[in-house]
Amino acid sequence: MTITHLISLANDSGGTLYLMLVLLLIALTVIIERTRFLANMQHGGARLIALLAQQEGRLDAFSMPESLSSLPHAGLFDIIRREGNRIDRVTLDQHLEEVIMHEVPLLDRSLWMLDTVITLAPLLGLFGTIIGMFNAFHVLGDIQNNPAQITGGIAEALIATASGLFIAMIGLVAYNALNTRVRTVLHQLETLKLMLINRCSQLNPAIAGGHNPVGLVRSPVRA
């Protein structure tokens, strides 16, 4: 199959094969970028959890590696350093959860584009096949044409549908794999949150019981 033949097929499909090529490039770009990004997040989060677990509760002895300071997980440690000894356990949990919620859009960024490609590619392929079928049956108007041209045109028209399904299958597999990585990173963030709260509670007994932090005096309650 030569380039000239491919161009002819694309033209016979009403240009939908050109659009599907664009969809394929978009899907591959999102897949490669998100895979690299989420893989770095996942490996970095696993390393942080392992390093923190080695401290055996000694949070004050933990030092953040410079190579991991750019991870979304690092925001949890910033909250601990600023507020860990000043607020109770419930408030600390809410502040850490707020940091996690801010990181969620960063994790699943651009996945909507992949989801759109998965839905749009088969529909666009079907549309291209319909246009190709119109062109194939158009030869019936000329009695001098060979009937084999009709069947050949129908077979070529089905290439658009096959291309759309192929793109959708690649996108679907990648989309599910990327969503699994997103859930893994979110689980790491929740795990780190609990580990930090538990270790911070050991440093500040007031946090462990959810009582008023050290240094703050409550007004007496009168009957």
Image (cartoon, rainbow, N blue to C red):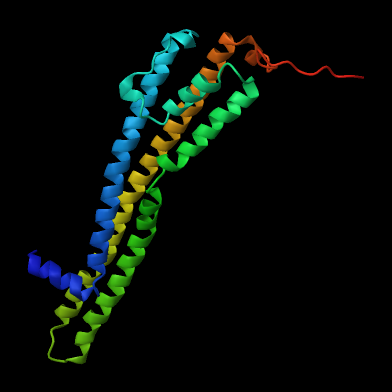
Give the image location of residue 138, x and y in percent. 23, 86
One can see residue 163 in this view? no
- Quarter of the image with the C terminus in it: top right
Looking at the image, residue 146 sits to the left or right of residue 181; the answer is left
- Identify the residue at image location x=26%, y=69%: 16
Q: Residue furthest right?
A: 223
Which image quadrant is residue 180 in?
Answer: top left
Give the image location of residue 76, x and y in percent. 48, 26
User: Camera-side residue: 99 or 220?
Assistant: 220
User: Camera-side residue: 122 or 63?
Assistant: 63
Which image quadrant is residue 185 in?
Answer: top left
Give the image location of residue 77, x and y in percent. 46, 22
Q: Identify whether 16 is placed above or below 215.
A: below
User: Camera-side residue: 213 or 2?
Assistant: 213
User: Camera-side residue: 147 or 220?
Assistant: 220
Q: Identify whether 85 is placed above or below 15.
A: above
Give the image location of residue 112, x and y in percent. 41, 52
